[in-house]
Image: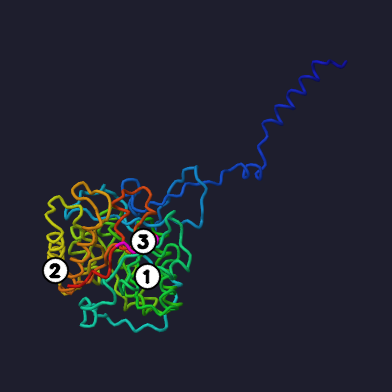
Amino acid sequence: MFYPTSLFTVFVCLLIFVSAAPLPLNRIQKRQTKFVTVTRRADQASSNPKIPALGIPTMDIPTITTPYLPTSFVPPIVTKSPSPQPSQPPQKTEESALPSNTPTNAPTIPETSQDTSPNYNDSSDSKAESAPSGIFWGLTYSPYNVDGSCPSYDKVVSDMKTISGATSHIRLYSTDCGQLENAVKAITENKLPLDVYAGVWISNGADRAQNEINDIINVAKKYGSSLIKGISIGNEDIFKGTIDESALINSINSARQAFKAAGLGHIPVYTTDTDAKFTQKMADACDLLQVNIYTVFDNNFVSIKASVDSILARVNNLKNIAGNKKIRIGETGFPSDGNSGTQSGNLKDQTEFANSIVCKLRAANVEYFFFEAKDAQWKKTESPLERSFGVYTSDFKQKLDLSKLGKC
């Protein structure tokens, strides 16, 4: 006999079975989010872990908020060096930024000279030029647009043409945004009187560091290595606490090995850090010492002249660990805006500082990079002081009266 209640029971069971069945894979995939947060900060030692052991990349866990824009790669933010004895950064435990193995597929550069234990301090390269092309011995250059995006090649060409009137040497921190290739290409195609000091950014892990090593090798292969005069492995990474000393030394040695294998053994390899953080072991690992020295953060400010005198004194204090190796200032400068807590940035003091440092270091035959070519308005989270060290405004309008600088 047929009972309506039995039919109802069967219908309910069937409905429960269908509802519990798993979603097809393609439907699950379509429901996955495609958004990750992209941070433009590259030096947040307080939130980023130390660089891991050689060959082990870091991995950031993304926050699902902002669409990922491939054209806006993380640009490095350059941290200013405070007083000669900066506060101790957070202690970390992991190790290096670079893989321990030399890349097996590193391209060879045919036109470079053979590497036979080069002397980076010979008479042709050991002294600063007494009459450099332009005002400054060198300028640091970060190419980013005001919104933090990568500039076009035409914009880099325009920047290089402007910079070439103020210096004959530029320092880069990274290969991000194709900046090394764009700079070398612009200088080559326009026959500009500039050369380049390249950088490998190691604060964001092994993968990025290795990619930047390969970028430098590939640029040298494509355009020749004659314009690349030096390579810094990192910038203030001991000061920032993103790596420890032994790991940094391993990183320098790994990078040097990779460049040597590619035929670039004649190019000096070193790191850049604050003078207070440079140790004998670091000096021994570097082909030269490159140090960042600022006085705007000092508590004992007396005058611009006294500040400039103290910079040269701090360079001389490094001679004990440098031995016969060159000491170059990787960054020094003064802001035109903002406040450090002890000193206020303004155009008058920036101009006085620039003129004093140019004359003082030229007379002492000390190579230096003045920080920086243009104001860094792309550093949206930084203070006005951090954004106003430029010789030019962020759109490369002249800020300092260069015609009055360097008349020592």
Q: Residue at x 18, y 48 (%)?
A: 342
Q: Nearer the viewer, residue 193 or 62?
A: 193
- Dot 3 and dot 1 residues touching (CB under 8 Å): no
Secondary structure category for the residue under label 2? helix
Q: CA distance from mark 3 to mark 2?
A: 27 Å
Q: Which residue is mark 1?
A: 162
Coloring applied to the structure = rainbow
Give, as a single range, the part of the protein colored magenta. 395-399
Question: Among all residues in the image, which is located at the extreme right?
Answer: 1
* Kind of residue sitting beneath label 2: Lys
Q: Is residue 108 visible to the viewer in this orientation of the structure?
A: no
Q: Quadrant of the C terminus?
A: bottom left
* Kind of residue sitting beneath label 3: Trp
The reply, left or right, for residue 312 in relation to residue 265 is left
Q: Position of residue 227 (x, y in %)?
A: 36, 77
The reply, left or right, for residue 34 in relation to residue 38 is right
Among the two numbered marks 3 and 2 on one chain, the one whose residue lies closer to the N terminus? 3
Secondary structure category for the residue under label 3? loop
The reply, left or right, for residue 244 in relation to residue 102 is left
* Most common secondary structure along the magenta stretch: loop
Among the two numbered marks 1 and 2 on one chain, the one whose residue lies closer to the N terminus? 1
Question: Vertical placement of 298 versus 180: above or below?
Answer: above
Q: Which residue is mark 3?
A: 201
Mark seen at residue 319: 2
